[in-house]
Image (cartoon, grey):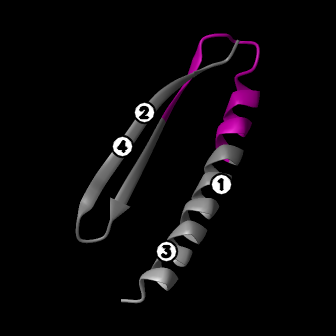
Amino acid sequence: MNEEQFNLELRKLLKRFGVGAQREIEQAAQQHAGQGGALKVRASLTIEGHGEVLVIEEQLPLE
């Protein structure tokens, strides 16, 4: 395995995920604007052959 190439591809994947996830969260927040409370967000990472390996849950305030 070429570790340098792997790390480059991994960074590309994480950037695509981060940009896409932020866009979706911002759109959801705009739809719920003015309602107060919090936006419940759950992100999960699944690796084929390993199943769900990481889950992050947060409540983002909408105030």
Q: Residues within 10 Å of mark 1 (few under 14, many from 20)?
A: few
Tag 3's secondary structure? helix
> The residue under label 1 is which amino acid type?
Gly
Residues under numbered marks 3 and 4 in contact, where contact means CB atoms less than 8 Å apart? no
Establish if 60 lies above or below 20: above
Q: Earlier in the sequence, mark 1 or mark 2?
A: 1
Give residue 57's mark.
Answer: 2
Label 3 to label 4, Cα distance in Å? 22 Å
**Which contiguous range is marked in magenta?**
24-41
Q: Is residue 1 magenta?
A: no
Residue drawn 75% across the image and 20% down it: 33
Label 3 to label 1, Cα distance in Å? 20 Å
Establish if 2 lies above or below 11: below
User: Which is more toward the observer, 34 or 23?
Assistant: 23
Residue at which label 3 appears: 7
> The residue under label 4 is which amino acid type?
Val
Q: Earlier in the sequence, mark 3 or mark 1?
A: 3
Label 4 to label 2, Cα distance in Å? 7 Å
Establish if 42 lies above or below 63: below
Left or right for 9, reference 23: left
Q: Residues within 10 Å of mark 4 (few under 14, many from 20)?
A: few
Give residue 20's mark.
Answer: 1
Residue drawn 51% across the image and 84% down it: 5
Q: Earlier in the sequence, mark 3 or mark 4?
A: 3
Q: Quadrant of residue 52?
A: bottom left
Which mark's residue is nearer the viewer, 3 or 1?
Answer: 3
> The residue under label 2 is which amino acid type?
Glu
Q: Position of residue 9 (x, y in %)?
A: 54, 77
Residues under numbered marks 3 and 2 in contact, where contact means CB atoms less than 8 Å apart? no
Q: Earlier in the sequence, mark 1 or mark 4?
A: 1
